[in-house]
């Protein structure tokens, strides 16, 4: 997990935080010296409770007649949160509010695909 986190973090300095929750294990990384970050406990519960719930309901809706689910982007006040399902879990990436999460998502997708190969 650490290698994929390092490769995603290297995409852009606008990536603030990365978490991978896979097979019941949470691995995370946070860029140093970022402003307006959320508390570590808050991040932990977001990864264990909130993001899996959001992905579950969005995937269920997407699977009905929308062609599935690729990812979800949430805009909080200070940042974006991009979350997506991965095998046996999910990937969560916090991105500066000034960045374009859709452009970064394409680069992140390439990193994930390279790790599968």
Image (tube, grey):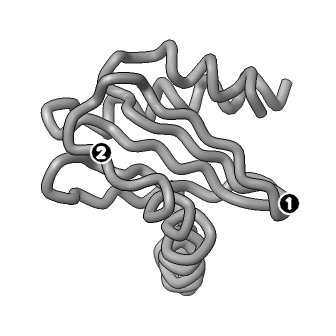
Split into 4 quadrants, where in the image is the C terminus? top right
Q: Residues within 10 Å of mark 2 (few under 14, many from 20)?
A: some
Identify the residue shown where x is 21% and y is 30%. Answer: 99
Work out whether residue 9 or residue 101 is closer to the camera in this orientation and state it.
9
Specify whether 108 is left or right of 114: left
Residue 57 at what x, y percent from top left?
A: 52, 84
Judged from the image, the secondary structure of the residue bearing numbered disc 1 is loop
Split into 4 quadrants, where in the image is the N terminus? top right
Specify whether 75 is left or right of 62: left
- Mark 2 or mark 1, which is nearer the start of the sequence? 1
Q: Nearer the viewer, mark 1 or mark 2?
A: 2
Residue 26 at what x, y percent from top left?
A: 72, 53
Please say whether residue 85 is visible from this viewpoint: yes
* Label 1 to label 2: alpha-carbon separation: 26 Å
* 22 vs 2: above or below: below
Residue at the disc numbered 1: 23
Identify the residue shown where x is 40% and y is 23%. Answer: 32
Q: Residues within 10 Å of mark 1 (few under 14, many from 20)?
A: few
Residue at the disc numbered 2: 37
Please say whether residue 62 is visible from this viewpoint: no
* 75 vs 112: above or below: below
* 46 vs 73: above or below: below
Give the total number of marks visible in the rendering: 2
Specify whether 23 is left or right of 79: right
Residue 2 at what x, y percent from top left?
A: 74, 27
Judged from the image, the secondary structure of the residue bearing numbered disc 2 is loop
Identify the residue shown where x is 17% and y is 48%. Answer: 78
Tag 1 and tag 2, C-beta contact below 8 Å: no
Identify the residue shown where x is 24% and y is 35%. Answer: 96
């Amino acid at each position: 997990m650490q290698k994929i986190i390092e490769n995603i973090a290297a995409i852009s300095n606008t990536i603030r935080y990365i978490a991978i929750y896979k097979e019941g294990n949470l691995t995370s990384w946070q860029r140093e010296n970022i402003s307006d970050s959320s508390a570590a406990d808050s991040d932990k519960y977001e990864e264990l409770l909130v993001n899996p719930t959001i992905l579950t309901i969005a995937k269920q809706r997407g699977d009905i007649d929308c062609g599935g689910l690729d990812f979800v982007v949430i805009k909080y006040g200070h940042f974006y949160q991009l979350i997506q399902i991965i095998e046996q879990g999910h990937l969560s990436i916090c991105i500066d509010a000034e960045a374009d999460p859709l452009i970064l998502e394409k680069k992140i997708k390439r990193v994930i695909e390279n790790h599968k190969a």
